[in-house]
Amino acid sequence: MKIIVCIKQVPETGNVKIDPQTHTLIRSGVPSIINPLDTYAIEEALRWKEKLGASTLVLSMGPPQAEEALREAVSMGIDQALLLTDRRFAGADTYATAYTLSLAIRKLAPYDLIFCGKQAIDGDTAQVGPALAEHLGIPHIAYVKKIEDIDLQKATVRAHRLMEDGYEILDSRLPALLTVVKEINEPRFPSLKGKMRAKKLEIPIWGADDLGGEVANFGLSGSPTQVKGIFAPPARGKGEILTGEAPLIAQTLIERLKAQKII
């Protein structure tokens, strides 16, 4: 059994910067972390590795510094890693990202399962996982909170998909792609042995020429959605605390809301 985990390195919340020319996130040189929801995908892959003896590989597309995220995943217990990095990948939206990842995964075939986090905290679209499955032509189950069973002989997986009012139990044939939510498990910490192994591991790097495909479908040129403008919301003015007796405060508040034509 072979499991592939797709992860993304994202800027730390307090260090988000936007390129004023391309209107895309600046990732190079910015302190970054593994997308938190992707750590649950890593953990789930590791649990099934332990149950079924699966081989595991973590895959990421990003600038060269994304190698740090891959090594962290390896230090948690993932077997192998692969980095997709090329200037031609820069500025990719969810469609172009999924397209690029799909080319790499086709070269990594055969595989049985692909795990992704539900969404990334920088874009919050939750689109890459399902789009990747569509590019690969395989079934997918989103918002998975539990994997009940994987039957390798029947080539099926049974998963619980989180819904607003409960959950659904779905069966899918393999290979399949699953996006997971944080309710699925509790990610482990890297071990000292894992950190030592991750430090020594040689991580292959593939660029556009290694993947093949249409160069026009990579990066900004292959992105049907683009940000046309960005702006910072206006700063909020200081509020005011009304004091006094409750009836007087209520009357004052009503008068001010009427003056501003709110009521």
Image (cartoon, rainbow, N blue to C red):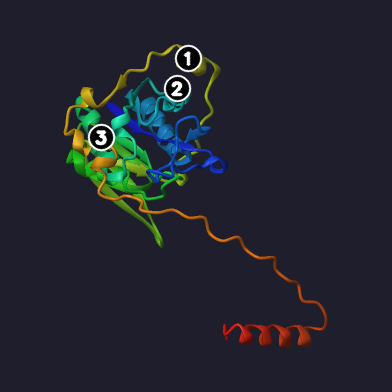
- Residue ranking furthest to the top: 200
Tell me the kind of residue under disc 1. Answer: Lys
Q: Which corner quadrant of the image does residue 61 belong to? A: top left
Which one is closest to the eye, mark 3 or mark 1?
Answer: 3
- Mark 1: secondary structure: helix
In this view, the residue in front, 96 or 117, is 96
Horizontal and vertical percent for residue 79?
37, 20
The answer to whether 173 appears left or right of 150 in the picture is left
Is residue 155 rendered to the left or right of residue 49? left
Foreground of the two, 184 or 114: 114
Identify the amino acid type marked 3.
Answer: Thr
Q: Which label sits in the foreground, 3 or 2?
A: 3
Distance between mark 3 and mark 2 Cα atoms? 21 Å
* Quadrant of image for the N terminus: top left
Residue labelled with disc 1? 199
Q: Which residue is mark 3?
A: 100
Q: Quadrant of residue 201?
A: top left
Q: Circle 3 sits in a helix, a strand or a loop, which is it?
A: helix
Q: Residues within 10 Å of mark 3 (few under 14, many from 20)?
A: many
Q: Residues within 10 Å of mark 2 (few under 14, many from 20)?
A: many
Residue 5 location (% of width, % of height): 35, 32
